[in-house]
Amino acid sequence: MKDVRITSDVGDVDQPSVSVSRSGGEEVTWHSYAGKAATIKFNSAAGSPFLKPEFDVPAGGSVSSGPAVSGASRKPYKYTVVGPDGENDPVVIIDN
């Protein structure tokens, strides 16, 4: 499990780039900031390496991505963290 903490109202995160092992079944878990909800969106042309393209981080909680799908390519996937006051675009990198 790779933990990514949202660190501001504008979607900043403590890990602007996180690597996930597809063969190891690793997942990303996003944690809310200051008890506020956020949305994670894989809406770039590359799509999502996970089963879903969007994840809702509940206020004061967290949400996990599930493992990368078997067809996910070994490459970076840009995503958007939508916070209450803005957006940020970090990256998930899929490894083996």
Image (cartoon, grey):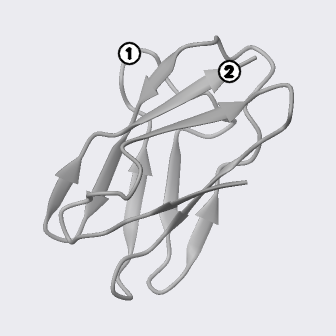
Among the 4 quarters of the image, the one containing residue 29: bottom right
Q: Amino acid at mark 2?
A: Asp
> Quadrant where the C terminus lies?
top right
Q: Position of residue 50 (x, y in %)?
A: 66, 34
> Quadrant where the N terminus lies?
bottom right
Other residues around mark 1 within 10 Å, as few (<14) / some (14–19) / many (≥20): few
Q: In this view of the protein, which residue sits in the foreground, 92 or 81?
A: 92
Q: Real-space Cα distance between discs 1 and 2?
A: 19 Å
Where is 39 relative to 96, above or below?
A: below
Q: Amino acid at mark 1?
A: Ala
Q: In the image, which disc is placed on residue 45? A: 1
Where is 95 relative to 34, above or below?
A: above
Q: Position of residue 11 (x, y in %)?
A: 26, 59
**Residue located 45% across and 16% down the image:** 46
Q: Is residue 10 left or right of residue 45?
A: left
Other residues around mark 2 within 10 Å, as few (<14) / some (14–19) / many (≥20): some
Q: Is residue 26 left or right of residue 42?
A: right
Among the 4 quarters of the image, the one containing residue 90: top left
Given this view, does label 1 or label 2 mark the residue nearer the observer? 2
Q: Which residue is mark 2?
A: 95
The answer to whether mark 1 and mark 2 are in CB contact below 8 A is no
**Residue located 65% across and 49% down the image:** 65
Q: Earlier in the sequence, mark 1 or mark 2?
A: 1
Where is 44 relative to 53, above or below?
A: above
- Secondary structure of the residue carrying tag 1 is loop
